[in-house]
Image: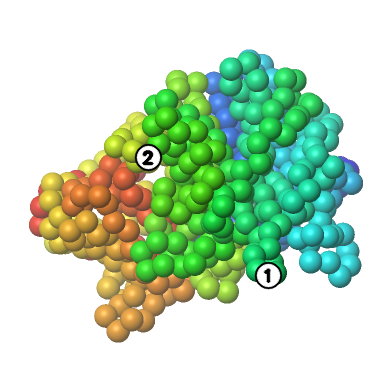
Amino acid sequence: MENAFQRVRDELERMGRTVGSCPFRTNYHIMPPVGWLNDPNGLCQFRGVFHAYFQYSPLNVHGGGGYWGHCVSSDLLCWEYREPVLAADTPEDRSGVYSGSALVETDRMYLFYTGNVKLPGDYDYIDAGRISTQLLVESGDGQQMSSKEKILGTEDYPADITEHVRDPKVWSEDGHYYMVLGARARRWEDGIRRDKGGILLYCSEDKKHWKLYREIVPQKAFGYMWECPDIFTLSGKKVLSFCPQGLARGEERFQNIYQSGYCLAKPGETLEEALCDSPEDTFREWDMGFDFYAPQTFEAEDGRRILIGWAGVPDTEDVHKNLSVKNGWQHCLTLPGELTLRDGKIFRTPVRELDKLPWQKGIAQENRYHWEDHAVRLFLSEIGGEKREVIIGSRKNGLIIRSEGNKTEISFLDETGKKALCGGGRGRRIGRTRGMVESLLILVDSSIAEIFVNGGESVFTTRIYLEKAERDMELCRSGKYKLEVV
Ligand code: FRU
């Protein structure tokens, strides 16, 4: 048992210096201390301190799981890394301590997660060969965990649900506890197997005994599997956030391999009613960039609903790369964003703690600004739909951010359609706002850029791998802009 955690210490000892000196390490984003990171897990504020756990593969830079990493912060921006809190070390979670969430009750923290087991053999791992168990651990300090307790297993899932059942998000409401799980439902259409993504809702009085009370699978398939569901209330409205897999790729919608977004119930409608036919028309994507998936939200002690996503997408290693791999790590999480509901849409803006950083005015010479280790914040306002272009890097090797009318585009392509090296194989992504583009907030922290259009109506997250010497920003001087560095 000790060994699972000792192995991480040894790997950190072996690789820590290489990882730490990588030019792509960020200042204000959660990264794996070594190896691979994916989904944010167990996000919460516990006795004033923010805790972020994450899917962590310290021993393999290409993933594969094994641990929940852990870090803490007092301001959501500067994170201190702690030892992992969970390892895949029991019969129920021996192939992976998968994603899950935190429930905080005064001085106890409860972490719910999925134990994954993949039996060796010739299985499809959909109907057979996989066992998904929902588990619970408790903690008084967010670091030392109680022993693992099984709370739901195969026998508790409806018969039409495959072995893909995971990612418990738990909350309390009206004196009861609720859990939402992502699922893949077994379905046939005209004799052909066509599975559908959906959610299972469970209810409990004591966090330990759970009863199924809803199975929601839309009539018309919206992907074959939904991962990482999250249900919360924003300005009195119920929101379901989830990650459907298997949607057809469009020109301006669903541009990545897997999606993440949300549905809101219409006035007088329950979430179930909103989802029963098809979420196709109501589903809005959280992010239009290349690197965003598996977000999770939590409520801060001051009542803010905060979202953190994984700045990555599964199964993309054949499509584009993260150039930090050679230095022994890959992936990071997004900046925490505060969610607000406006005109039936959720806006995401970086948490206000960002304003407290000691930003200094950036001095741009000509139309260029060079930075190396700083994080840069560029705000363009009063755009009125006019054409704007900002280049991070250079025209030959950079990311071009263009907006015109209601359209924003981020592109690593040059005029001939060749992809910039710093994009690692990424091409172009497009997003639109309801009205004209009025403002662009561009945040670049070493190897990640996050672009917030019209106060967070539309957001683009992308990794960008510029060597320090190449960290230029080409600014358009037309219109109003403010450039700051920290
Ligand atoms: C999403 C996901 C989750 C799962 C975890 C495993 O990226 O596939 O559904 O719990 O990653 O790392």
For the residues carrying marks 1 and 2, which lies nearer the camera in this image?
A: 1
Residue at left 57%, top 50%?
Answer: 218
Q: Identity of the amino acid at label 1?
A: Ile
Q: Position of residue 87 (x, y in %)?
A: 78, 45
Tell me if I can see residue 44 in this picture: yes
Question: Which disc number belongs to residue 262?
Answer: none
Mark 1 close to ligand 1, CB under 8 Å: no
| Colouring | rainbow
Q: Quadrant of the C terminus?
A: top left
Question: Which disc number belongs to residue 346?
Answer: 2
Residue 37 in the figure: left or right of residue 403 = right
Dividing the picture into quadrants, the one containing residue 358 is: top left
Of the pair 303 and 237, the residue shown nearer to us: 237
Residue 368 in the figure: left or right of residue 161 = left
Residue at left 82%, top 51%?
Answer: 131
Q: Secondary structure at mark 2?
A: strand
Q: Identity of the amino acid at label 2?
A: Ile
Q: Which residue is mark 1?
A: 192
Count of numbered labels shown in the rendering: 2
Label 2: few (<14), some or many (≥20) within 10 Å? many
Of the pair 266 and 313, the residue shown nearer to us: 266
Q: Position of residue 40 (x, y in %)?
A: 58, 44
Q: Secondary structure at mark 1?
A: strand
Q: Position of residue 447 (x, y in %)?
A: 44, 58
Tell me if I can see residue 286 in this picture: no
**Label 1 or label 2, whichever comes before in sequence order:** 1
